[in-house]
Image (cartoon, rainbow, N blue to C red):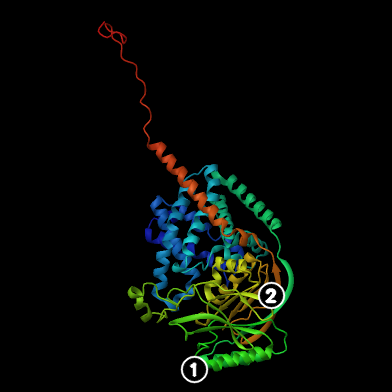
Amino acid sequence: MKSFGHWLASPWRRSAVAAMAGALPVFAFPAPSLWWFAYVALVPLIVLIRSAPTGKRAAYDGWCGGFGYLLAVHHWLLPSLHVFIFLIAVLLGALWAPWGWLVRRFLGGSPGPGQGLAALVVLPSGWLAVELVRSWQGLGGPWGMLGSSQWQVGPALRLASVGGVWLLSFLVVAVNVSVAVLVSVREARMPAVAGLVATAAATSAAWVWSPRPDVNGRVRIAVVQPGIVDGSASGDKRFAREEQLTRRLAGRDLDLIVWGESSVGFDLGDRPDLARRIAALSRATGADILVNVDARRSDKPGIYKSSVLVGPDGPTGDRYDKMRLVPFGEYIPLRSVLGWATSVGKAAGEDRRRGTEQVVMNVGHGLRVGPMVCFESAFPDMSRHLAQDGAEVLIAQSATSTFQHSWAPEQHASIAALRAAETGRPMVHATLTGVSAVYGPGGQRIGSWLGTDASSAEVFDIPLAHGVTPYVRYGDWPVDVALLVLAVWCASEGARAVRLRRPGPEPHVPPARTVRESPARPGR
């Protein structure tokens, strides 16, 4: 161990180890999907940081760990962003620097039981603060939140209905901190065990108490996934393939048919022939069709990505324009400065325009659906607002063809399970090229995934649920609690620092007595 510690004395070697340790949680996400690994994946990084010789070095370790984490969960962006993915990971990785400092502050040296117990609350709160900041759309959005690794764990999905993915992230980090204390901090092992027991008790109570979705009724929704369509005139070829697959759905007693993102490459106002062909499909199948148009608008300037509902008589007028765009993929931040990104990667040649509000659509069979586009499904607040506005089914239209042979399609499909569990509403994740997936109101998978090798139209019998989950009612309360914990700790540290700096009262020193003088009557 001493030789390894000496080897880590090199700042570069230590930084490399921190980056590798920070990348470990990626194996808890799809495609490996080792969900159980999330509960110990942070332990090596925490143990490394607590051994930092100074607070500054601990902050650097946290920064490097954040860099490794972000690079790992976004590694599939490398072919599109090239060097930019490293730049983004370096910049956003800095968010973990304060967290690294906190780890050493609470666990460095020989922390006492009280300090170890406080670490079980403050360190997960600090992690949530980092996830909150990086979840801002302008910084790339909440892709790869640690709690989303639990998408296939039934009890975790129940907890998501109480506090969303935020609560899961908090609990996962708390368990990692407890395990790290157990293996490396002898003085605080009892608080670590108590913390694990308390976490288990609290999660069990929440699991028992949290209300189940009130299921009443079912709908039949079809997903049309055309698969990879390459070559010249790919837009027309894709439309023809989608048309062919949709015709096979006639007579299936459907309530809605969903096509993937960018399933129509032309504005329906400019191509009324396409609108008529989709309307004919609606009449043949007896169901409205939700398509996604990626084109320059005919009624306003700019390119939009829009979910458009088409009925037997043509477009119904229900339209949702994508609000949260993918940085670099659909727009370039500070294009005047970073516009050169188009020459080294697959960055957007022209910025897409943003929509202004979310929309709940009334489908012809009386069904109310809430559409989202692409990585908007990663934002918990969007699905929550749609549920509050009365959506009975959440729908995400996506296209991951650029990342076909990576972990991205599986990871994107898994996110929908969390959104369904959080809101108590079933969710349909429909893509052009896979993975397409459907989840029930408790986050449970319905049917099989349509993989990246599939070109088909599949029908899903989906249970509907009513009622309001605690997460929909109370929102991101775990984040509020985490920020309150950090604020209270900062205030207590500030008060402690003031007390240490304040000079104490001058000690009382009695006047010196001499042979000829007395203190009461000087000179005598």
Using the rendered image of the protein, determine whether residue 317 is visible from the camera's viewpoint. Answer: yes
Mark 1 = which residue?
A: 233
Q: Position of residue 420 (x, y in %)?
A: 63, 69
Tag 2, which secondary structure? loop
Residue most extreme to the left: 523
Q: Is residue 512 left or right of residue 193?
A: left
Mark 2 = which residue?
A: 446
Q: Amino acid at mark 1?
A: Ala
Q: Kindly identify the residue that appears in the image at 53 percent across and 76 percent down.
A: 374
Q: Position of residue 81 (x, y in %)?
A: 42, 76
Q: Amino acid at mark 2?
A: Ile
- Callout 1 crowding tier (Cα within 10 Å): few <14, some 14–19, many ≥20: few
Q: Position of residue 474 (x, y in %)?
A: 60, 58
Q: CA distance from mark 2 to mark 1?
A: 35 Å
Circle 2/circle 1 CB separation < 8 Å? no
Asked where in the image residue 164 lies, by quadrant, the reply is: bottom right
- Callout 2 crowding tier (Cα within 10 Å): few <14, some 14–19, many ≥20: some
First in residue order: circle 2 vs circle 1 = 1
Q: What number of labels is visible?
A: 2
Asked where in the image residue 479 lies, by quadrant, the reply is: bottom right
